[in-house]
Image (cartoon, rainbow, N blue to C red):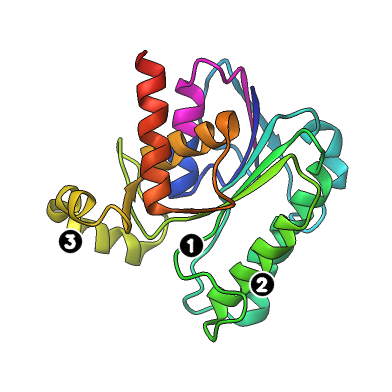
Amino acid sequence: MKVLLFGASGMVGQGVLRECLHAADVERVTVVGRSSIGVTDAKLVEVIHQGFTDFTPVAAQLAGHDACLFCLGVSSSGMTEADYKRVTYDYTLAAAKVVVAPALVFIYVSGAGTNATGRSMWARIKGETENALLAMPFKAAYMFRPAGIQPMHGIKSKTRSYRISYMIAWPLLPLLRVLLPSAMTTTERVGLAMLNAVRAGAPSIVTSRDINRLAKVALVTAGS
């Protein structure tokens, strides 16, 4: 399959990119960003583009993919609603409108607690983004709503507060994954789950428990 990836420099995106590059059935990964991610691989193609509210100038380079994995996102901490909506809603829909096709699967990284009618600013905007994507004529659209994500394989969050939190909680994270399968997952599992969702389908709303289940199926299939 040919995969289009947004947000490859972020914590989740790094994990997804790793699994895409390792997957035998992924022949090409096209990464879209404002600058190079500094990764070299025979499968990897980079599209450098600055204007994330308008992807039409690079539309030809974004066409012809089987899946779009949209991992681009920011923390709402310290952001105004307008700024957060521009990054969360406007950027996502700008990309979706350019790549939408009846043969393409679109996966969006949302978050646990997302609610289009909720009081929380981030949850409401994430929910509005989900609803807009689900209404578009893709082959399928899956909204990934992970809660806690443990970074694996040396991956680190770009958000300082998250890095500190992970550092403090690191000794407990493996235990939490066992005790709280509905709340905890890993960057590796998110990547594996996304690829399995593209291959075999998934619920429209994908929770951490679903992510872990999809990842397990992907591992079993790869080992068979």
The disc labelled 1 sits on which kind of residue?
Gly
Label 3 sits on residue: 168
- Indicate which disc residue 124 carries: none
The disc labelled 3 sits on which kind of residue?
Ile
Q: Is residue 20 magenta?
A: yes
Residue ID at (26%, 62%) = 164
User: How far apart are the two marked residues, 2 and 3, measured between alpha carbons?
Assistant: 31 Å
Residue ID at (41%, 20%) = 221
Q: Quadrant of the C terminus?
A: top left
User: How far apart are the two marked residues, 1 and 3, measured between alpha carbons?
Assistant: 22 Å
Residues tagged 2 and 1 counted as in contact (Cβ below 8 A)? no
> Front-most of 164 and 212?
212
| Label 2 vs 1, first from the N-terminus | 2
Residue ID at (42%, 47%) = 210
Label 2 sits on residue: 85
In the rendered structure, the answer to whether residue 131 lies left or right of residue 158 reads: right
- Looking at the rendered image, the disc whose residue lies closer to the viewer, 1 or 3, is 1
Q: Can see residue 150?
A: no
Label 1 sits on residue: 111
What secondary structure is marked by label 3? helix
What secondary structure is marked by label 2? helix
Q: Dot 2, crowdedness within 10 Å: few (<14), some or many (≥20)?
A: many
Q: Dot 1, crowdedness within 10 Å: few (<14), some or many (≥20)?
A: many
| Label 1 vs 3, first from the N-terminus | 1
User: How far apart are the two marked residues, 2 and 1, measured between alpha carbons?
Assistant: 15 Å
